[in-house]
Image (cartoon, rainbow, N blue to C red):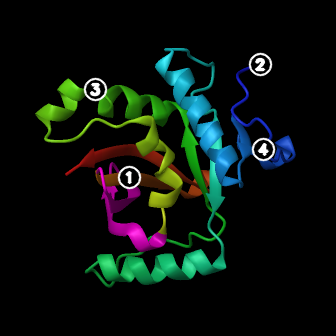
Amino acid sequence: MGPNFNKGARRIGRDRLPPGVVAIVEDVPLLELAIGEMHEFVVAGKRLESARAGIIFGVVDVGERLAYNWNLQRVTDDVNFFVGDLLGLRHTLDLEHLTHIHHRHSDPAKEELHGQIPLTLEDILLIPQLVQPRNLRECCYIREMCRLVYARRWDHGQLVAVEEIRFHKKELVIVTLYKHQ
């Protein structure tokens, strides 16, 4: 049995969760705790059998779908560009991609080469606030997968998150996060 990233979070039936996902976290302080525990797990260099273990931090509802549709029209010039219906898709952060974010985008030497600022735990905790329809900046296809690019400026720099749409798993998965001035 792997670590419990969801102390005190609402647990739902295992048959309703994707494989490896430990919880849907709705409460903001509990979400920060869950992300913080996942981050500590990655920093310690620990591994799980399933890199897909992670948390769901939101589900696209009707209001959010309307906001996404409006913002997708705003950021795509191609009138024939079709993403699909995002209703019911789950915003997910898993260990595989959190490991990438930590190892690739938290190292000052690597980030300096790309003109970026190293990420901190505080930046990673901002993911749920960043991944909102109003922060959507671009929609594109990379390796035949549709990706949504979000950006928002905070006092310490601009955070950019990329979420991959996986209709077959009903997920919007955070694949990377980085920060620049």
The residue that mark 2 highlights is 1
Q: Is residue 148 magenta?
A: yes
Whether tag 3 and tag 4 are in contact, CB under 8 A, the answer is no
Amino acid carrying label 2: it is Met
The residue that mark 1 highlights is 161
| Label 1 Cα crowd, 10 Å radius (few <14 / some 14-19 / many 20+) | many
Coordinates of residue 86 in the picture (x, y in percent): 56, 69
Q: Which residues are magenta?
A: 133-156
Amino acid carrying label 1: it is Ala
Amino acid carrying label 4: it is Ala
Seen at 18% across and 25% down, the residue is 109
The residue that mark 4 highlights is 9
Left or right: residue 36 compared with residue 14:
left
Coordinates of residue 170 in the picture (x, y in percent): 62, 56
Q: Looking at the image, is mark 1 or mark 3 earlier in the sequence?
A: 3
SS under mark 2: loop
